[in-house]
Each structure stands twice: as structure tokens, then as C-alpha cells.
Image (cartoon, rainbow, N blue to C red):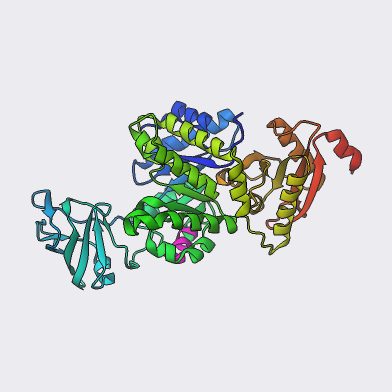
Amino acid sequence: MRRHRNVKIVATLGPASSTKDMIRALFDTGADVFRLNMSHGSHDDHRARYDAIRAVEAETGRPIAVLADLQGPKLRVGQFTAGACDLEEGNRFRFDLDTAPGDSHRVQLPHPEIFAALVPGSNLLVNDGKIRLRVDECGPDFADCTVTVGGTISDRKGVNVPDVVLPLAALSDKDRADLEFACELGVDWLALSFVQRAADVDEARALARGRAAILSKIEKPAAVDAFEEILAASDGIMVARGDLGVELPIHSVPPIQKRLVRRCRSAAKPVIVATQMLESMIESPMPTRAEVSDVANAIYEGADAVMLSAESAAGAYPIEAVRTMDSVARSVEADSNYRAIIEASRQNKLHSVADAIVTAAREIAETTDIAAICAFSQSGKTVSLVARERPRVPIIALTHLESVLRRMCLTWGTHCVITPQLSRFKEAVVNATRAAREFNFADETRQVVVIAGVPFNVPGSTNIVRIAPCDERLIFASDPE
């Protein structure tokens, strides 16, 4: 069994990591969640990877979460007569709906929704922000611009529009087909791209029909502005720093990241910090010191998970990338400053019986000799509340629902265990202590805190906390019923 680590590692699968043996190696090295990037590969490719993940899950006897990341609408320019041209600072340039090949003066932008939203003074960014243009005049089928940052513009380069909320749905026709495919496949989480408003999340949730949890990617300024509403509508959040860094001043991204991570923790919803975390390891077996610091900072901030993208999907060193992330996480979590930072950022606002129960459980674990907090959950909410406390002891998350079990694998500090369907609290206590012993969190001399709700199998009924010995003879002696 892998030694317990609190922060989770999300590894993206791709050409470099498609075989069952490689996926097993990534899992054994430390990956907790596997991401299927729907922007690349066919449905058959993703089905084969999903089947390989489930085969590894069966081999190891450990639940694994699968996250399908939807592409979102892609905004791109048309094509050029020569394939590319140079734009110089100060020059005028037009975007329009004309399908004729472009030149140094104009090019097609086949998105009337953009023209409908633009106003003079808006900025258009091309090729990940390498080229920037300011809109001087615009109409329903054109935008006349001044080049503010020049460069080479070429066929089908992406366009970002940071200053306005675009009248575009987060789900394209491709996304809708991919969402249905992913849900039928059995993925646990859906990552939603191009989120601008809570209504985008509501639309995806209606299509998912409870078959997968919804994780909103925060990658646009509009999503930052509407974050509270988006967070309330979502089951989890991904801070996608790549596009944020294109559409916002790059220096503003770190404080935004910190703020979003803290708000997610306060709301007891898992948050992934993603994009270019160990980018150099696509080609190098060693990361840069700056990348290591970036991963460490996300963990110090309290993120539930950190993510590898191309590093594990297409890089030359996928196993080394996971091993590096695992080593950084363990080093940070062993640092006394980590506990001080995490505990200083804890918010002690109690609004419900469940809040009070999990706070009590954490305080008991920190003041007595407790090996673990064992939380039973019908929906995953109780476990998320325990994780919000960031306790010093492991969290054993228990449920009889396989779908809930896998989703909880994304949550900070959780060791997820399937149980039979239970009907009595004493059965829960016995199953909790058995799990603690089986997975080497405790022996018979130790105690655990057990959290559950009575009546059983009712979401939101958390109302009991008990200190239980891990010696079953003592459990039955004190409670013979």
C-alpha cells in the first residue's frame, strides 16, 4: 500500500500513457485521478484508456477517479493565402466574416458572436496572447483593430476575448456528444471548459443527470468575476492558470489562485490547481526549481489536487513527473510551516449540525491519541466537510456507493473504502475500525473517531461522532446490541 499523502495528483492520459502497464505504473508511483482530455483523441481512444484504468482498479483493489475534460468552444481565425503573415505594432488589421483567405490587412473570424459582443476599446488576443489588437471600430460582421503587440499570425490560430462576456454556451455540439459519451462510459467527474456564468454549469448538470459530478474550470475573467455563483453551482473547481494568464495580466494570476483555493476550501468543495506545473518535464527528466516551487505553493495554499497535463500525456518522462509531484507533496506536508499555514487559514464558521460534528471530530483527533477520522457518507458531503478541516490525521472515507467512493478520491486527505450497505451505527463502527486496521492506519491498541448519520443511507443526516477502539472485542463488550 502506498504511504498516505493528503494532496491528490491528477495525471492526464495520452499517447505517452495509454497502456495498462503505464497506467498501473503511474498509479503505483502516486497518481490518484486520471484525466481524459476530450480535446485530443477519439472516443475509442478514451474508451480503451478508461477500460485500462478500471482494470488497474480491479488489480489493486483501490478506487480510482476518472475525470473527463470537455474541450469547450474553440475560437479561431480562418486561413491565410500564404499560410501566415506578419503583423507589426501600430498597423491596422480587420477581422470579418468573409471566407476569402486572409493577408496582412484582414482575415476571417468565423464567430459572429464575438462581433456581437465587441465594443471599441476591447482587446483581441491571438495565439495565446502573443499577438494583441485593440478594437477601434466594430459592427455585426467586422472589427477594425490596431496592432498593439505584433507577431506572426497563421492559419487557425486561437483567439481570446478577455474584456467581454461572449454570448456563447460553454458546451459546443462536440462537447454535448463528448459529455454523453463520458457519462455512458462511467467517468466520475466532468470538467467544464469556457465557463462564464453559473448557467453554464446548470446546463451541464442537466445533461449529466447525476451520472457524474461537475467541476468548473476557471479560465476566463468573466468566471473570476462570477466565481461565487459558479462555485455554488459546481461540485468542484479547477484553477486553469494557462488561459487565465493569457486573458488577465500575468501578475494577477497568483493572488487569484490563492483566493479561489481558499474559497473552495471554505465551501468544502475540491479544487485542482492546473496548467504548466512541471512543463519542462515534457522533455527533461528533472523539473526547474521554479516549477517545484509552483507545485509546493499550491499545496501550501491548501489545494485538494495538483495536475499534470502534457507532462504525463505526451511527455518523455510521465512516471518521473508523477514521482516529482509526489515527492514535493510529501516534503511540503512534512513541513511544520505547512500545518501552521493550513491551520491559520481554517475558517470556524458553523452553520449546521454536520459542521459542528466534523469540527468536534477534528478537535478530538488533535487533542487525543486518535489514529484516523472515519467518515461515512451517502453523497460525499460529510467527507468534504471533514477535509475542509484539514485534520492532522488521515481521513478514511466510507460508503457503499461505488460512484460516490470514486468521486471522493479527488478530495484532500481521503483514503476511500467501500463497505456493505449498513443499517445500524454499531455496524458502521466495526467496519470503520476494520478499515483502519486493514490499511495500516491503526492496530488494535489505537482508537479512531467515527462520524455517521442516523438513520443510515439518508444524505445530509450526519449527527453522530464516536471515539471507538480498534479492538472489536472492546466494541462488542461496551455495546452488545
Judging depth in this view, the residue of 257 and 178 nearest the camera is 257
Tell me where residue 175 appears, x and y as whole percent. 38, 53
Q: Which residues are magenta?
A: 197-205
| Quadrant where the image shows the C terminus | top right
Q: How many marks?
A: 0
- Does residue 480 appear anywhere in the picture? no
Q: Is residue 170 left or right of residue 338?
A: left
Tell me where residue 227 appears, x and y as whole percent. 47, 63
Tell me where residue 317 appears, x and y as whole percent. 39, 29
Task: Identify the residue at horizontal 35%, vertical 59% (top origin).
Answer: 248
Q: Residue furthest top?
A: 21
Tell me where residue 141 appears, x and y as whole percent. 19, 69
Q: Is residue 396 magenta?
A: no
Judging depth in this view, the residue of 459 and 120 nearest the camera is 120
Task: Identify the residue at horizontal 91%, vertical 38% (top origin).
Answer: 477
Judging depth in this view, the residue of 296 and 273 nearest the camera is 296
Task: Identify the residue at horizontal 54%, vertical 56% (top origin).
Answer: 262
Q: Is residue 39 left or right of residue 299?
A: left
Q: Is residue 428 left or right of residue 382?
A: right
Q: Is residue 311 left or right of residue 298?
A: left
- Helix, strand or loop: magenta stretch: helix
Q: Is residue 204 magenta?
A: yes
- Does residue 145 appear anywhere in the picture? yes
Say above or below: 165 vs 356: below
Say above or below: 223 vs 427: below
| Quadrant where the image shows the N terminus | top right
Residue 232 position by quadrant: bottom right
